[in-house]
Image (cartoon, grey):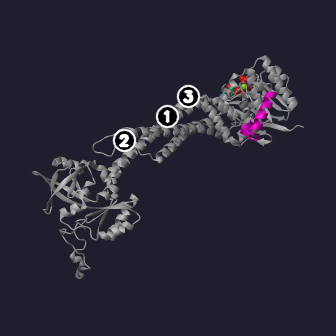
């Protein structure tokens, strides 16, 4: 039965194939724009997220400087039952270093949810070069782990990241910092710690993260160098950066670790909540542009179908006179609309893919993003699926009202009118 | 012998636009199987209006209409479509063929809609009807490539495809020259005499009417002779 209606729909459509092609091209255009836009915007999202998120630990284990939670008075048995008010609490010079790191490493090694971890020492220092003294920060890192988990190597734009490990007393400077210090590879910079220690370090590389503020203050050395600089023993660590298999579990695991290791643990979502907002805005923009384009295409289809119905009054009248019901006629026009949608939509995702590939190959070189060579594209299958679904929904809606109008045509009026 | 196929009881119809005008008053008659009936009357007396009611396309009337002993009142639009498809064949003054389809497909469409026979059977039956009307050679032409007389024969073939209880025609020869009118009339006559087909044909053509078995004459929305 419905195959007969489809055949009739096909013949009506072919009789006006030029107009239907125009309508289908409208759908193709909007769907391809939609898919390309969404892929590009999300590629951009990934890129910008990657800028921070890929280089940020999912869970950071550390010790915060803060006043003790258990002030002496609370521990006193005498005041146990009373409300104790203490004013102007100050933090004591509690240790920044994490206790019992061996034990933590053991547990992390066993945890199946953990992809890997990288220990770190961060400290505030002064850089002196000639008469210049600049505040900055030094990060003692395990180059191998840091490169594997947080792509450290990719951001070393001059020199060699591995030298940090191989050359004793070496340092990699942020690009902005290196410029301020006028330090080139091979030069020696003097480092002053806040405790007054002084140590010369050899510059073996320049680091460019893409975030200028960061590059003006940050520098990297090996963990051993940092420990030496701080005058600490070789188990001194201030941070353990954990990368998880599933980033979504970070808040939960952070809480768990904080309790387990009796220290602070911050998850990536809390640390970088502002990035979500940017991504959401870009996604909303691409969806709204896509929907607007589709609505325009929908009106195109609506017009074509109305015209078709006006032209095919006689056909509709005769179909009804010979025994086709109103709902049969309605189906015929819905089929016409949907086939425009399917054809236009499929072609649309194909072109959308094409546009994405083209964008993906346009060179995009910016000094702040050394790892990026072309515009970013995210080829997620979901966008193509959404494109197809959207094209079907819009064409159905655009076809619905003309089809209903056709189903209500009174054959007597048409036949009498001749 | 006289099996009643169609019966109209006290059918009244008025148009309300712009003022109330009564077009049909108290129309009652019966048609039995195998009858060849013509309806005549002055222009504007309500013949077409009556035919649209009898064909179930117009449902805005008072009185009762029975087709195959079934009351048409209160039937849904889709049920009436089935009645038209199965029981009624139409021939209009204008051929009303679908130009998107060829002759054979035009004839087949109501048969495919009925869905009683397979596609191959419907095609075979359609060819039989075209042969009977002497236009089997035109089967694969598009509808708009035929002459007026040929088109009218195609619509007769189409009206026959589901072996309807009754064929209704509204001035089927009105648009044809004498020669073609005669051909169409002879076809109707053959259908009635050889195949015992029931026919109800509205016509202006006196000689056409004179040759039918029964004449219903109308004037001012009433039947004055039957
Ligand atoms: N939609 C309508 N609204 C108002 N009046 C109408 C309408 N349709 C038809 N009429 C009137 O009803 C009357 C009967 O029309 P009808 O078409 O049935 O006549 P007819 O007998 O078939 O005439 P003809 O022989 O010229 O075809 C006419 O007076 C016509 O003006
Ligand atoms: Mg008339």
Host chain of mark 3: A
Host chain of mark 1: A
Q: CA distance from mark 1 to mark 3?
A: 13 Å
Residue A361 horizontal side relative to residue A97, left or right:
right
Residue B4 horizontal side relative to residue A314, left or right:
right
Residues at discs 2 and 3 both on one chain = yes
Residue designated by label 2: A375
Residue designated by label 3: A18
Whether tag 2 and tag 3 are in contact, CB under 8 A, the answer is no
Report crowding for label 3: few under 14, some 14 to 19, many 20 or more residues within 10 A (C-alpha): few
Q: Total label count?
A: 3
Q: Considering depth in this image, is B54 or A167 the residue closer to the camera?
A: A167
Q: Is mark 1 within 8 Å of ligand 1?
A: no
Host chain of mark 2: A
In the image, which residues are magenta? B111-131
- Give the number of the disc on residue A26: 1
């Amino acid at each position: 039965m419905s195959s007969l209606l489809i055949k009739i729909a096909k013949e009506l459509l072919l009789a006006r194939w030029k107009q239907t092609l125009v309508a289908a091209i409208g759908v193709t255009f909007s769907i391809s724009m939609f898919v390309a836009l969404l892929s590009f915007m999300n590629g951009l999202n990934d890129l910008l997220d990657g800028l921070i998120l890929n280089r940020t630990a999912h869970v950071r284990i550390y010790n915060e400087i803060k006043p003790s939670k258990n002030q002496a008075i609370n521990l006193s048995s005498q005041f146990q039952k009373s409300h104790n008010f203490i004013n102007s609490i100050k933090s004591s010079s509690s240790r920044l270093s994490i206790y019992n790191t061996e034990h933590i490493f053991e547990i992390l090694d066993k945890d199946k949810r953990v992809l890997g971890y990288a220990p770190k020492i961060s400290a505030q220092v002064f850089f002196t070069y000639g008469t210049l003294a600049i505040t900055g920060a030094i990060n003692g890192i395990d180059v191998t782990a840091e490169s594997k988990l947080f792509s450290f190597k990719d951001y070393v734009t001059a020199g060699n990241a591995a030298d940090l490990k191989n050359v004793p007393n070496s340092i990699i400077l942020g690009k902005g910092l290196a410029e301020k210090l006028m330090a080139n590879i091979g030069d020696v910079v003097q480092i002053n710690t806040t405790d007054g220690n002084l140590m010369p370090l050899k510059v073996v590389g320049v680091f460019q993260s893409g975030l200028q503020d960061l590059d003006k203050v940050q520098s990297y050395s090996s963990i051993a160098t940092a420990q030496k600089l701080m005058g600490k023993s070789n188990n001194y660590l201030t941070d353990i950066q954990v990368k998880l298999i599933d980033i979504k579990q970070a808040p939960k695991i952070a809480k768990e670790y904080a309790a387990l290791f009796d220290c602070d643990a911050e998850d990536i979502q809390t640390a970088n909540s502002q990035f979500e907002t940017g991504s959401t805005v870009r996604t909303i923009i691409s969806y709204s542009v896509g929907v607007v384009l589709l609505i325009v295409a929908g009106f195109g289809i609506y017009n074509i179908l109305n015209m078709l119905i006006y032209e095919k009054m006689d056909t509709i009248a005769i179909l009804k006179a010979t025994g086709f019901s109103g709902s049969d006629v309605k189906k015929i026009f819905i089929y016409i609309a949907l086939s425009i949608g399917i054809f236009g939509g499929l072609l649309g995702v194909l072109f959308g893919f094409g546009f994405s590939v083209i964008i993906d190959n346009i060179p995009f070189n910016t000094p702040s993003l050394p790892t990026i060579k072309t515009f970013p594209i995210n080829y997620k299958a979901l966008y193509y699926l959404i494109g197809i679904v959207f094209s079907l929904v819009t064409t159905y809606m655009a076809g619905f009202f003309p089809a209903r109008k056709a189903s209500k045509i009174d054959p007597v009026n048409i036949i009498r009118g001749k | 012998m006289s099996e009643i196929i169609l019966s109209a009881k006290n059918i009244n119809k008025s148009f309300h636009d712009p003022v109330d005008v009564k077009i049909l008053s108290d129309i009652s008659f019966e048609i039995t199987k195998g009858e060849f009936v013509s309806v005549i009357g002055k222009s504007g007396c309500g013949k077409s209006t009556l035919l649209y009611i009898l064909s179930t396309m117009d449902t805005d009337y008072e009185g009762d209409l029975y087709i195959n002993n079934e009351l048409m009142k209160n039937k849904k639009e889709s049920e009436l479509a089935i009645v038209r498809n199965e029981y009624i064949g139409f021939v209009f003054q204008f051929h009303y063929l679908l130009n998107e389809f060829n002759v054979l497909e035009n004839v087949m469409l109501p048969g495919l809609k009925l869905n009683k026979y397979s596609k191959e059977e419907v095609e075979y039956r359609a060819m039989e009807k075209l042969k009977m009307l002497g236009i089997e050679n035109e089967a694969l032409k598009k509808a708009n490539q035929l002459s007026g007389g040929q088109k009218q024969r195609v619509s007769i073939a189409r009206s026959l495809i589901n072996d309807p209880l009754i064929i209704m025609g509204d001035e089927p020869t009105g648009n044809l020259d004498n020669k073609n009118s005669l051909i169409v009339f002879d076809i109707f006559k053959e259908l009635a005499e050889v195949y015992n087909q029931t026919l109800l044909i509205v016509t202006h053509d006196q000689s056409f009417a004179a040759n039918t078995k029964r004449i219903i004459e109308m004037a001012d929305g009433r039947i004055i002779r039957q």
